[in-house]
Image (tube, rainbow, N blue to C red):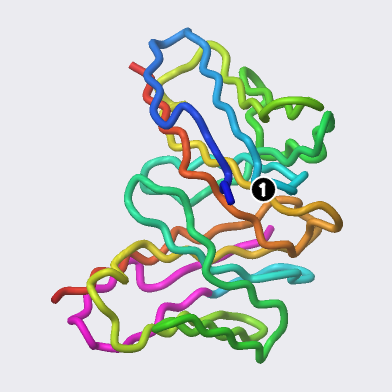
Amino acid sequence: EDQVTQSPEALRLQEGESSSLNCSYTVSGLRGLFWYRQDPGKGPEFLFTLYSAGEEKEKERLKATLTKKESFLHITAPKPEDSATYLCATSGGGADGLTFGKGTHLIIQP
Amino acid sequence: NAGVMQNPRHLVRRRGQEARLRCSPMKGHSHVYWYRQLPEEGLKFMVYLQKENIIDESGMPKERFSAEFPKEGPSILRIQQVVRGDSAAYFCASSPPGKHSGNTIYFGEGSWLTVV
């Protein structure tokens, strides 16, 4: 059974304090790894898709990387508006649906 | 450029009533997915549909839940005889036509069901 584990569960940073969120996965035949951002009361907002180990993608203060066992979401010099829950999900193993982790709740304090 | 549209956004039902949640996919998308998010839990896949076809319903509870995506109109997730444990956020997502595995899927804003 596919598994996605995110750590830490919650993270509180000062504005400008860079850090990384981890997503460890076990899936047979990974077809894609996805990062989403979710604000309270809203739906997940797409950030990145990664397909193969070594791949990296960037968007503003966020950079996502992928290895054969885990993905990192690096956040550089975060701002309060980056506060959200960040979700990691995988596609693969012959399943039609994505397998989601429980998310990392990120708080950026001014 | 409308995204995935869900309604109602919030729905309150008494135990034993029926809940109907509607979803219109993004323009040009032909794959529709429903996910459920229970409090303090991650998103869980429920069902994957294409027009007039249920492709994968492996995540759907065996009883009381059904989904459809008719030739015309939105996709519908129907929950009969709701119980308190059905209270959750239900998210619809869609992806473009063609091979879907590995495709990015885009989510709607969700429908929050409260059963009282």
How many other residues sit within 10 Å of disc 1, few (<14), some (14-19) or many (≥20)? many
Q: Main secondary structure of the magenta part?
A: strand
**Occupied quadrant, residue B62:** top right
Decide which of B21, B42 is in the foreground and name it: B21
Q: Residue furthest left?
A: A110
Q: Is residue B54 above or below residue B37?
A: above
Q: State whether residue B61 is above or below residue A46.
A: above
Kind of residue sitting beneath label 1? Ser
Residue A66, image x, y percentages: 61, 84
Q: Quadrant of the C terminus of chain B?
A: top left
Magenta stretch containing residue A19, yes or no?
yes
Q: Magenta stretch?
A: A1-23
Residue at image point 73% right, 41% down = B48
Q: Residue furthest front?
A: B1
Where is residue A17? Give x, y as percent.
24, 88
Which residue sits at x=49%, y=16%?
Answer: B82
Quadrant in the picture for residue B80: top right
Residue of label 1? B94
Question: Residue A75 location in percent, x, y?
Answer: 38, 83
Q: Would you say A97 lies left or right of A110 here? A: right
